[in-house]
Amino acid sequence: MPSTRRRPAPAAPAAPNPAATPAPSSASPASPPSPARTRDAARSREAILAAARDEFAGHGLGGARVDRIAERAGVNKKLLYHYFEDKDDLFRAVMEEAYLDIRQAEQALHLADLPPAEAVRRLTEFTWNYYLAHPEFLTLLNSENLHRARHVKTSQRAQALNSPLIQTLGEILERGRREGVFRGGVDPLQLYISIAGLSYFYLSNNHTLSAIFGRDLMAAKARQERLSHVVDVILGYLLRD
């Protein structure tokens, strides 16, 4: 006779253990900044540096105001301080950009590809014309010297930017010496200081010099005479008889 005992009901499946099942992560991996955001950041920084250059050139480090720089750049002060710690940090960056601009322009001359005398002439003419076209560069230098170059001293970038020019000039001088064109024993640093100084002093002091000697030293004829004089002085010192 068949058994009437009921079979046991199948066990219900176990409920999942929340502790054993990892919860889906709500955090997504950080994505890199979009190209548009990167471009916007670069534009903002460039605008701040351009505004700061004009402000420092017009008022000096002491008279410059961060409020006016932010307003000129079209940004708020919070964003400005996001890129630069304080006014001194901003001035240091402006000086670095100023040196970068002139050194890049000098590189475009390709001085190493020119005959030695032509290379020195080209550098001398370039320096004069650059100072004429960028009076703010002279004003920034004046301001930094008033503060004993404390910003440039702490800028490895500024020092690194200026060293290659002296090296290139030294190579040009040595090439000229080997070819019998230049005299020997010329220090390239001293020569560059002379090239810069002969233009810098005239332009940075033209108001007082013009008033004292009763001549308009910034008239077109006077500027051309000065450039010819500077070139003659530099090459006259270098060229062998």
Image: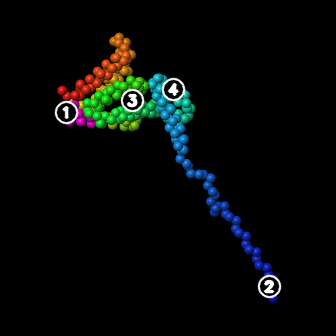
Q: Earlier in the sequence, mark 4 or mark 1?
A: 4
Identify the residue position indicated by label 3 in the image: 149
Q: Nearer the viewer, residue 164 or 64?
A: 164
Q: Would you identify the image quadrant in which residue 77 lies?
A: top right
For the residues labelled 2 and 4, the Cα–Cα distance comes to: 102 Å
Residue at the image point whose x is 71% and y is 69% from the top: 13
In the rendered structure, does residue 180 fall within the stretch colored magenta? yes
Specify start and end residues of the magenta stretch as a single range.
171-182
Identify the image quadrant of the N terminus. Answer: bottom right
Amino acid under disc 2: Ser
Return the x and y of residue 88 as percentages of the image width and height: 46, 31
Residue at the image point whose x is 56% and y is 51% from the top: 29
Amino acid under disc 4: Arg
Q: Earlier in the sequence, mark 3 or mark 2?
A: 2
Q: Residues within 10 Å of mark 3 (few under 14, many from 20)?
A: some
Identify the residue position indicated by label 4 in the image: 65
Q: Earlier in the sequence, mark 1 or mark 2?
A: 2
Label 3 SS: loop
Q: Main secondary structure of the magenta part?
A: helix
Identify the image quadrant of the C terminus. Answer: top left
Depth check, mark 3 against mark 2: the one in front is 2
For the residues labelled 3 and 2, the Cα–Cα distance comes to: 107 Å
Q: Are marks 1 and 2 in contact (CB under 8 Å)?
A: no
Can you name the residue that lies furthest to the bottom here? Answer: 1
Q: Residues within 10 Å of mark 4 (few under 14, many from 20)?
A: some
Amino acid under disc 1: Gly
Residue 50's place in the image compared with 21, above or below, is above
State whether residue 86 appears in this view: no
Identify the residue position indicated by label 2 in the image: 3
Q: Which mark is residue 180?
A: 1
Depth check, mark 3 against mark 1: the one in front is 1
